[in-house]
Image (cartoon, coloured by chain):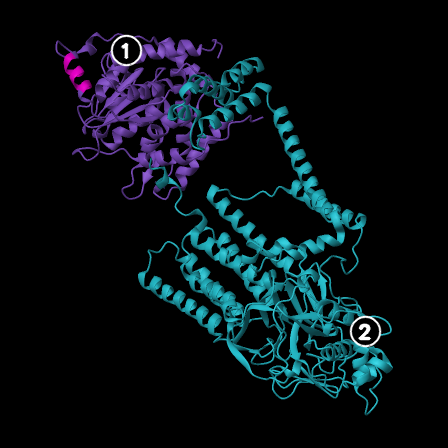
Chain colours: A purple, B cyan
Amino acid sequence: MASPALEPARAARLLNRLEDNVARVIVGKRDTVRLAAAGFVAGGHVLLQDLPGTGKTMLARALASSVGGTFKRIQCTPDLLPADITGASVFNQKESTFDFLPGPVFANVVLADEVNRATPRTQSALLEAMAEAQVTVDGETRPLPRPFFVIATQNPVEFQGTYPLPESQLDRFLVAASMGPPTSDEAAEILASRQHGDPIADLEAVLGLAEVVELQEACLKVVVAAAIRSYIVSLLDAIRLRPEVALPASMRAGLYLQRASQALALFAGRDFVLPDDVKSLAVPVMAHRLGMRGRAAAADVVAEVLATVPLPPIRHHA
Amino acid sequence: MALVKLLPRSPIEDSGVARAFAFGTFAVGCLAIAVYGQTYLAPAGTLLVAAPGYIYSHRHRHDPPDRIRQAVIAGLVFACLAYFVFDSVLALFGGNLPQANFVMLLVAVTSFELRTRRNLYSTMWMSLALLYLAAVFAWDVAFAPIVLAWLLCLGGFWTASHLKRIGAPRFQVPRVPLAAALVAAVALGGGAFVLLPQPSARPAGPLIVSLPTYVSFRGELENPALPLVEFGADPSGSTANINLRYRGRLGDQVVMYVRTGAPGYWRGLVFDSYQKGIWTATHSEGQTFRAYVDARQLPPPQGPQLGSFVQVYRIVQPMPGVIYAAAPVESIYYPAAEIRRDYYGDWRAPAPHAAGTTYSVVSALPDYTPGSLKKLAGQDPSPAVYPQYYDTGSLSERARALARQLTAGIDPADRYELVMALTRKLGSEPYRYSQNLSRVPPGQDPIDWFLFDAKVGYCEQFATAETLLLRSLGVPARLVTGYSTGEYNPTLDQSVVRARDAHAWVEAYFPGHGWVPVDPSPGFDPLAATRFPNRWATSGLARLIPHLTIGAPGAALGSLGALALGPGLAALLIVLVAASGWLWTRRRRLVRSRSPGEFQLLRLYERIQRRLRRRRGPAETPLEYEHAIVAGELAELLSDVTAAVNRGAYAERWPSPADMEELTARLS
């Protein structure tokens, strides 16, 4: 990278501006907003899962509108086809050629609403694009724009007419967050803010695309000490050894945990990762990837592991 | 909060290795009991039961509790208790080491229900109790490897369980310090052995009463048990007599070991009637007691007392059932259904002693100092009631004259001076001690012949002569046989009594003091009283802890004097120097490997945690610690130090020494 590294303080300023902007629409839920934003800065994709009407889509839209660049929204339904997402080649009669009409996935920020309502076939087309950052249509590979960020929402699987995402596809999301119900104060504030219209209409982009790229590069430069690396490894090991865990966290989970921790450090204006970053991200980054036996809750297991696994001793690792 | 629930459920119980080591401690305890208790059935049997028990309880450690099994085990525990009561009080099963058998049975029974770590700890406590019981009877250095093996098992248990608890994959032995310690210990021991003066085989401490034998007599034992006494048909010895014309040969065989708080004469049988060279006891009546004779059941010792002391006797050869004990006895425990105390206050077992018989005696320690003995109170036993104590038998007229001559010029009322004068005169030239006697000429009284012709004899001649001469002067006296103290072995901390230590001495009556032992044999202390090396040991707490022999180690020390402290102090010094040197180099290496600010910062962080009285948990990040604790006035400093620690530990940016000085200053 030729460009000078972004000052941590400036990165924190940019990110706080982004957070504040989203907070104009999303009342409370600072943690969820920060998680989603961290996933964005870390270059991953974010899955929001909660009951309908809790503000998932609102958060996704607010985040998307706060960032410059193109924004597309895919409303997933059972009859959505892969070509509806990736785009298709259309015959141009005038020039007797096939012209490629890019689908909604060709955008900087893509909102895949209710992703578990799409058929598995369509889901896999989207998720492939997420993983590869490119789309192959009619044998021709087309790169997706940079930065590329998917924020997907899904309702809990008990609802009718849904196709739950398989574990291998859930694994592609860097962060899975839930909104949770608002407190009564927050609910009153939400009512007040929407008395004369929806504030999202007034939301302006506060981060340019160049700045987003800069932030993503700064994120890669955040220092991860050897102690932090071994802490992440011991977390993964401890989770693997839990009897309730049938499908343990993959290596990708470890990589994502490290990258998301780097991003979270930027929010605090730090150029190094603290174990606290890892701890606060462990549940959202890892819980949705674990296959559990019986009725055990993955989030509880990860929380227990966090409470018991010792930190590497604080000393010089020369 | 719910942290307790989150800890691993039972790390120690899950470790099969730890369990194996716990079983090892029990096996070592059984071995010790087998070696030193010389009882084999109970150790082997309980080991055979406990081994599958340990395996069973390890396999079923996660099973829900089984009420029926627990009830059965509780019932068996009570059965063990009943056995213990019956065997120790009534000696129903022989009374051989009932405590040890009880402990081993308990371990065997409970081995099927070893679920928690507390169960494991308690079995190890019990094995320690076995070791302690064996230690009471241990008489040689072979006990040291047993203790070592027990400690190794304990260390193994500890290591295995802690490794399991911290979830470590394997244990790295600190090889270099261990090897260094080993080499240092060998070098130190060798150096001490070479440099320190070696004590002679017999320490010249105050404890040693037994004197060297005067002839190096070696030969077989014609009556191995009690060479001076001829025993009749009755194994209890009640018809025994002593024939001065007959002499058993005395060998070097060890007869018994005595662990004692003070050196004394181990009194056996008393004889009061002498006729024509043969001593007999005129009274054969006695009183039977249960195996444990309490002090309340016996007449209190006469005269002023200094205290009491304990002896534990361990018979190593089959012997007639005379229970040796220092007189006067306060209480006695002998492993038999009943024991008998005869007319003269000596004790007899119902059957001969088997090899390995162990019994214990608490004896009073009368004040037999000259000053005390000169104060008389009361009367002598009446000649009308106790004629046998005044009966001079066949003593010749010239012998009576000799008695008067030897005590010429002494006030007959001064009993102490009278008795001691006679004792000293008999124990000196021209009378000599020898075990090589020619036969007494036929028709001559052995005592007359000894006093006027041979003038050479051994203890029986001396004691008999003194007894009869004292009686001729009107002093009640009688003959006592038994063993002298024996050779004190500081390694064993016990007195080794050999066949050649068989002895005979005199008891003279002192009104107000009772029967006082005196010994005319040359080379023995004329006043054969037990003496304490340390008066303190006879009073206060030491009296309440009978097995604690406080005096004896002092005697071992006494032979070396202050030098005895040398090896211990030198070892301590070396250990201290080595330990501090090791710590210092470690610390230096640590300091050198760290930037100065890092070392100071981490030390400051430690100090703050100590000041706040709560340490950072192993799973707690510095920030979590900062938020979880109420730091009060230290809050600001803790916040700054936490930030610095985070920067250092996770970004390798340690503060400069100048910054650290400022931070450290803020702590005070």
**Where residue B120 sits in the image (x, y, percent)?**
46, 54
SS state under label 1:
helix
Q: Main secondary structure of the magenta part?
A: helix
The residue closer to the viewer here, B248 or A243, is B248
Q: Nearer the viewer, residue B593 or B310?
A: B310
Residues at marks 1 and 2, CA–CA distance in whole angstroms: 127 Å
Q: Quadrant of the C terminus of chain A?
A: top right
Q: Picture coordinates of residue B652 (x, y %)?
A: 53, 20
Q: Count neighbours of disc 1 (C-alpha within 10 A) and say few if under 14, some if 14 to 19, many if 20 or more.
A: many
In this rendering, the answer to whether B596 lies above or below B349 is: above
In this rendering, position of residue B638 left or right of residue B219:
left
Q: Is residue A166 visible?
A: yes
Q: Position of residue B331 (x, y in %)?
A: 55, 68
Q: Which mark is residue B311?
A: none
The residue under label 1 is A21
Which residue does the image show at 62% across and 41% down from the upper left? B174
Q: Which of the 4 image quarters holds residue A100?
A: top left
Chain ID of residue with mark 2 = B
Q: Which residues are magenta?
A: A185-192
**Image height check: is B480 above or below B68?**
below
Residue B406: mark: 2
Query: Would you say residue A96 is visible in this rendering?
Result: no
Q: Nearer the viewer, residue B550 or B575?
A: B550
Q: Give the letter of the chain under mark 1.
A: A
Q: Residue type at mark 1: give it.
A: Asn
